[in-house]
Image (cartoon, rainbow, N blue to C red):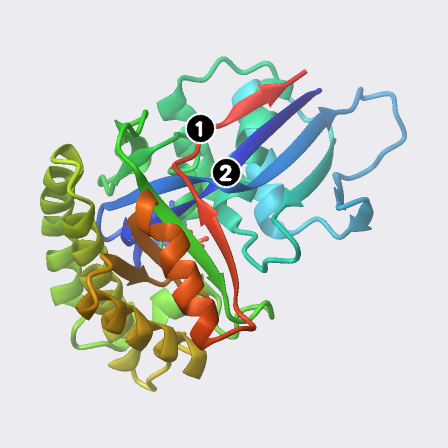
Amino acid sequence: MATARAYTNIALIKYWGKQDPQQMLPYNSSLSLTLDQFYTETKVEFLPKQTNQTADSFVFAGVAQPVSPKITRMLNLIRQAAGWSNFARVETENHVPTSAGLASSASAFAALAAAGAQAAGLQLSPRELSIFARHGSGSACRSIFGGFVVWHAGHDDQSSYAEPLLATVDFPIVVIAVLVDQRPKKVLSSAGMQQSVATSPFYPAWVQTAESGIATMSQAIAAHDIARIGQLAEANAMQMHATTLSAVPPFTYFAPMTLKIWQLVQEFRTKGLSCYITLDAGPNPKLLCAKQDAAAVVKKLQAALPQLQCTICQPGPGVAYRD
Ligand code: DP6
């Protein structure tokens, strides 16, 4: 039996599109920052053969749920590596501040891969664990590590993994998670990226720009240049979203409130606050800024839109085990 905790991450150069959906190989490399506020804790227990359990079981937030095909797939990978056929009992909890609607498949599959591998007695290197997590959800391979992380796209199962770029972040960058809507996504990220890949005439340009963005973003991180990191992350997010607006039929993850926040962020910049927006496959934006500006940004946002819930996140740690 083993319990692991993994934190969510926000991509500054995003993963958007699979060149091999079976192996979960992306078209482009991506770069993220692990956050310290939202995490998943998962316990996995492989049951002895003599128990009468005839399938895997899954308990989420204390309630029994059907075992999803993705969970089964991850457990099968672990069983295969361990040479086992025992069924597993999986218990998981998401820790997000006050119904923030920010639970993610990244923390979920990183925690499941880590707890499962440990429970099966596998001695995996962090890289091998990242490869396992990738099979649950692409972005999960980055949540194995803390701080700034790069996922190398690679060309096959073993060459597509994440590794730390800067595990201990010694400069004051923060991410403000803004809650616009906590309903489930209308277009799941896997379906959305598939539609962009298949139909957007801009998709090849996306892959090229994102891939070259890794080097530029890495330089900005090495220089501790928060404004540059923010500019590059905002540009990359909009380039990703351009592949949804240019898909056939077009679709978008922006909600009216998301656009409003983007406009406010642009206005804050004209007033001297260095603040940048990024957005994944849902309407809830994340704002990048220096720690000393975070309180002022939240205050201004809430003055304009009083109903907004904001959580200030700092760089977070990699996966950890609990006894
Ligand atoms: C927009 O990792 O959720 O958040 O691999 O299909 O499970 P699957 O997708 P997922 O996609 C994340 C997409 C993104 C960008 C990113 O996190 O890099």
Split into quadrants, the picture shows ligand 1 in the one at bottom left
Crowding at label 1, few (<14), some or many (≥20) Cα neighbours within 10 Å? many
In the picture provided, is 263 more to the left or to the right than 175? left
Please indicate, yes or no, whether residue 282 appears anywhere in the rendered image: no
Secondary element at image label 2: strand
Residue under pointer 1: 318
| Vertical comparison of 18 with 319: above or below | below
Residue under pointer 2: 7
Quadrant the N terminus occupies: top right
Q: Quadrant of residue 279?
A: bottom left
Q: Residue at x 34, y 44 (%)?
A: 291
Q: Residue furthest bottom?
A: 249
Looking at the rendered structure, which numbered label has been put on residue 248? none
x, y (%) of residue 223? 11, 35
Amino acid under disc 1: Gly
Q: How many marks?
A: 2
Q: Residue at x 61, y 44 (%)?
A: 71
x, y (%) of residue 170? 28, 27
x, y (%) of residue 80? 55, 27
Q: Quadrant of residue 88?
A: top right
Mark closer to the chain start, 1 or 2? 2
x, y (%) of residue 274? 22, 57
Quadrant the C terminus occupies: top right
In the picture provided, is 100 more to the left or to the right than 272? right
- Along the viewing direction, whichever of 273 and 196 lies nearer the viewer: 273
| Vertical comparison of 205 with 73: above or below | below
Please report contact status of discs 1 and 2: CB closer than 8 Å, yes or no: yes
Q: Residue at x 17, y 77 (%)?
A: 201
Amino acid under disc 2: Tyr
Secondary element at image label 1: loop
